[in-house]
Amino acid sequence: MRSLLAISLRTTLLTLLVTGLVYPLLVTGLAVVLFPERAQGSWATDERGQVVGSELLAQQFSKPGYFQPRPSAAGQNGYDATASSASNLGPTSKKLRDGAADVLKRLEAGNPGAPTPVPAELVTASASGLDPHLSPSSIAWQVKRVAAARGLSEERVRAVASAHTEGRTLGFLGEPRVNVLLLNLALDRQFGRPSQPPPASH
């Protein structure tokens, strides 16, 4: 009995050592050497060189001069990188329907003249709540608003969006996509930050 217990303890300790210490350190070390930028968090910087987020995580953009990502159910107010999750609401949920209806109304009100219908991904949250990408069609749907808010032609905004459209991974996996944060940063670098709207007169 004692010998079996000793073997079990040694096996447990060895497993903990290999899987809990050696393997994580080895993988992390290889990642730092082979993919240093990714291993450090894929930080994105603005035109002044300041870190403003990670290109792997969506963040909220509410100003009209910026492209807006998908809605988020991560955390209490959404876009919480420490609480990646979906809403877990089913298709029969009234709360889900009402929430989507509210998002749809906001999008339609904030994007006058945009083509219809509104792309479904702009109304629905991703499974993680932190998907940093949008499809080219969802980007194109927002071009009119962004161009007007920045005082630019739609063609110039489309050109920047096209330059930041990523193709399929390895040429055949997934779909073309645009990283919303990187696109917004590119617009700021090329054209400057959008001016603040004047305060409403009373």
Image (cartoon, rainbow, N blue to C red):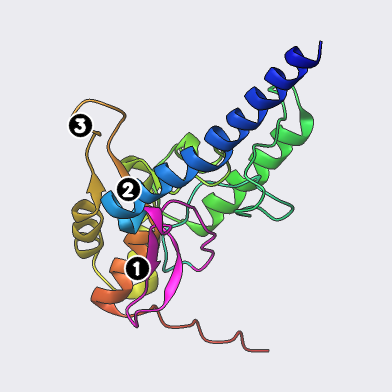
Instruction: Give the amino acid type for the residue marked by disc 2 in the picture.
Output: Val
Q: Nearer the viewer, residue 109 or 181?
A: 181
Asked if 15 appears above or below 4 in the picture, the reply is: below
Question: Looking at the image, do the residues carrying marks 1 and 3 touch, with CB atoms under 8 Å apart?
Answer: no
Q: Nearer the viewer, residue 173 or 65?
A: 173
Q: Secondary structure at mark 1?
A: helix
Asked if 115 appears above or below 113 in the picture, the reply is: above
Q: Residues within 10 Å of mark 1 (few under 14, many from 20)?
A: some
User: On the image, which quarter does residue 134 sit in?
Assistant: top left
**Camera sees residue 127:** no
Q: Secondary structure at mark 3?
A: loop
Instruction: Give the amino acid type for the residue marked by disc 3 in the picture.
Output: Leu
Q: Position of residue 8 (x, y in %)?
A: 70, 19
Residue beneath disc 1: 185
Residue beneath disc 3: 170
Residue beneath disc 2: 178
User: Seen in the image, is 100 located left or right of residue 120?
Assistant: right
Prevailing SS of the magenta stretch: loop
Measured Cα–Cα span from mark 2 to mark 3: 16 Å
Which residue is painted at 78% across and 30% down in the image? 94
Q: Position of residue 43 (x, y in %)?
A: 40, 63
Q: Nearer the viewer, residue 15 or 178?
A: 15
- Which circle's residue, 1 or 2, is located before the other in the chain? 2
Q: Position of residue 46 (x, y in %)?
A: 36, 74
Asked if 54 appears above or below 83 in the picture, the reply is: below
Residue 24 belongs to magenta span? no
Which residue is painted at 38% across and 50% down in the image? 29
- Which circle's residue, 2 or 3, is located before the other in the chain? 3
Which residue is painted at 38% across and 58% down in the image? 42
User: Which residues fall within the magenta stretch?
Assistant: 39-63
